[in-house]
Image (cartoon, grey):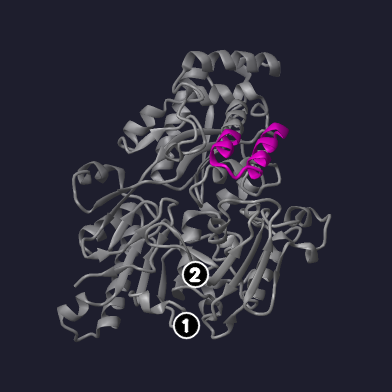
Amino acid sequence: MKTTLKYFSLLSLASTLLLTSCGSNADKNACSSSQNLTVNIEGDPNTLDGRKARTTTDYTLICTFNEGLFRTDAQGKISPAIADSYTISKDGTHYEITLKETLWSNGDPVTAHNFIDSWKSSVRKGFPSPNLSFLYSIKNARNIKKGSLPLSMLGARAEGDYKIIIDLESPVPFFLELLAQTVFFPTHPLNEEGINIANNTSEYICNGPFILDSWKAANHIIAKKNPNYWDSKNVKLQTLTMLMLDQEAAYNMYENKEIDVVGSPLSSIPLDHLINVQERSDLKNNPFLCTYWLRTNTNKYPLNNKHFRKSLAYSINRKEIIDHIFHGKAEIATGIVPKTMELNNTPYFQDGDFEKAQDCLQIACKELSISKKKMPTITLLIGTNEKNRQVATVLQDTWRKELGINIEIEVLESKVFFDRVARQEYDLAWGAWTGDYNDPSNFLEVFKTKEVGTNNTGWESPDYIAAINQSYEQMEQESRKESFITAESIIMEELPVIPVIHTTMLYLQQEKVKNFVVHETGRVDFKWAYKEN
């Protein structure tokens, strides 16, 4: 009954928005020409603060309302946004960036100080920023975070209101891509930490294509075109409505043409309907820089043993998961870097190698001084999604049958899930990592050190750190690639994270929707979207 009531409530909302924009007496042609887009998202974002973003929904919403120095354009290329011009030194370590004169949604100027102050807040000791490693490219940022240097030593400064100077620790070939990430976005000083944006939408000050109009938790978010956006002439949508429906209700609304887009990466198409839409022209299948994996808490017994982790990894039948849950729209992952990045085409281990898995479990039992029968029950954390449940059930059955290991599945809401993982209060955690830019470093940096906010496994390796650091010193692509291969081989030997599959994005899009941009990073950009009459 709750789902049904919510369905009709949101249907009523969508109808009201349409009538508001068209006029209650408007004819059908006028209504069809209105620029209002309705999509379904999995649920509320965890944050609209670019410094704290962690999920695909977070990133998409933050980029809807905000903008940094650079933006990934509709063709997937990095293009200047707030940056008007820039120069890079010959050695690749010194950047000078001049800003356009742009405005915040409240009319205040966006200045170089807004950028620098935001970056400084992220590197301040104790501030939670999951993608802090991106900022570590800036000179002294890492030591400032550790508390060994003052904030004044950060290698980034404002020169007047519209110029930013950045000095790097070493050359970073993809630094412009990093500057397009939300952790590098400016923050308005009035966006106070801890403000309940959902209840105070008018207090959320932003500088992107859209402004936040309303937000009802677990129900909907409505965005309106930002009249103060510097490139507003290229924003055609007047209203963007993001509903939060379960998969079945959203699919039904899509079939009734009451929702314009449904599916990955913002939500999912119900599995029982996915087979029926395989041949339809409105089904889109986009490449995705994404790896689904299992984080292991290497501080917890018996996951602190490498061979125990190997036994779990080797026994997984990834092909079965792909065939029965993802309907063949995925690839076996035996490394953490997606195959599309062409880092290493040789599998690090064989899929579903039950014999080797049992051998590893025997070694683990010997090293842990425990019999297989006395192995404790392992808890697997998952998010609230039907695919997650199905994958977890397959893993539970496989490990019980092949290894005799009991698995308890714990389902958590998104915010609770990420909080538990961040505090390392888990045994195993099922999740995915989506690349922020097309470079292997984006996947390998995740586990560089224990202190990296995205690691959360308790694992660290001096050899791994050395391989990553070596890649910083190499501007030649083949040399960088060798360093990355070395790093990936180390983590695949230790397996603090167990790769399972690489996926693609499947979504349904109404024919009249144009320029709906879905980047390979899984971020949706509504800036250029519009509807044809």
Residue 75 versus residue 193: which sits nearer the camera? 75
Give the quarter of the figure containing the C terminus.
bottom left
- Under tag 2, what secondary structure? loop
Residue 512 versus residue 379: which sits nearer the camera? 512
The residue shown at (42%, 47%) is 385
Residue 287 rendering spot, x and y as whole percentages: 37, 46
Q: Are marks 1 and 2 in contact (CB under 8 Å)?
A: no
Residue type at mark 1?
Asn
Residue 198 rendering spot, x and y as whole percentages: 52, 71
Residue 1 in view, yes or no: no
Residue 436 in view, yes or no: yes
Measure the C-alpha gap from mark 1 to mark 2. 14 Å
Residue 367 rendering spot, x and y as whole percentages: 69, 16
The residue shown at (74%, 58%) is 126
Residue type at mark 2?
Ala
The residue shown at (15%, 78%) is 28
In the figure, residue 447 lies in which quadrant?
top right
In the figure, residue 445 lies in which quadrant?
top right
Q: Which residue is mark 2?
A: 81
Q: Which residue is mark 1?
A: 228
Vertical side of 262 occupied by 324: above or below: above
Segment colored magenta: 461-484
Vertical side of 353 occupied by 181: above or below: below
The residue shown at (68%, 53%) is 136
- N-terminal label among 1 and 2: 2
- Report if residue 55 lies within the magenta region: no
